Amino acid sequence: MHLMAKISGQQEEGTKGLSPEFLEMLMAYNWPGNVRELVNTLERAMAAAYNEPVLIPQHLPPHIRIQVAQNAVKKPLSVQEAPAPYKFGGELPNLRDYLEEMKGQYLKRLLAVAGKDLRKACRISGMSRSSLYAHLKKYKLL
């Protein structure tokens, strides 16, 4: 937060908020370049966010998002970390049913982050407006 305030002052912009996902990704990255790389990354993220008030993972450079994703895939998933419904024990669910449930949870979280701004939801999710509408309608979130 100290670095963000310092960078905001240098760039004559208001301080931007940080989404929980953005912070999680920063913490998950191993930072081989140490503080200099962190400062550079925050500067680039602020530039990428432009007028947006909150930084999200999509504002981070691709190499950081890729490394964090690769590390997450390499890490074995424990039963405690597994998403519902497997998390609570019982049999492993049918993959199709499980993915459908995860899509529904993702869309609910997306709407919570984006609020009623569907343009922002499209940008965060990478979906087209028509695709987002179709998914929201399918999961009865619209």
Image: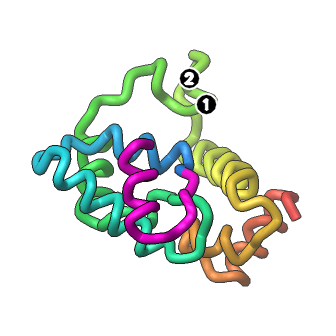
* Residue nearest the viewer, comparing 113 with 70: 113
Q: Which quadrant of the rendered structure holds the C terminus?
A: bottom right
Mark 1 crowd level (few <14, some 14–19, many ≥20, 10 Å Cα): some
Question: Is there a contact, CB below 8 Å, between mark 2 and mark 1?
Answer: yes
Q: Residue furthest left?
A: 32
Count of numbered marks: 2
Quadrant in which the N terminus is drawn: top left
Left or right: 29 in relation to 52: left
Instruction: Look at the picture and state if 11 lies above or below 81.
Output: below
Provide the residue designation for mark 1. Answer: 84
Residue 120 percent across, percent down from the top left: 67, 71
The magenta span reads 1-17
Q: Which mark is residue 137?
A: none
- Which residue corresponds to the image point at 38% horizontal and 59% vertical from the top-left? 7
Chosen colour scheme:
rainbow
Query: On the image, numbered disc 2 is attached to which residue?
Result: 87
Q: Is residue 122 above or below residue 110?
A: below
Residue 107 location in percent, x, y? 69, 56
Q: Quadrant of residue 2?
A: top left
Q: At numbered mark 2, what does the secondary structure look like: helix, strand or loop?
A: helix
Q: Amino acid at mark 2?
A: Lys
Residue depicted at 25% across the width and 51% down the height: 38
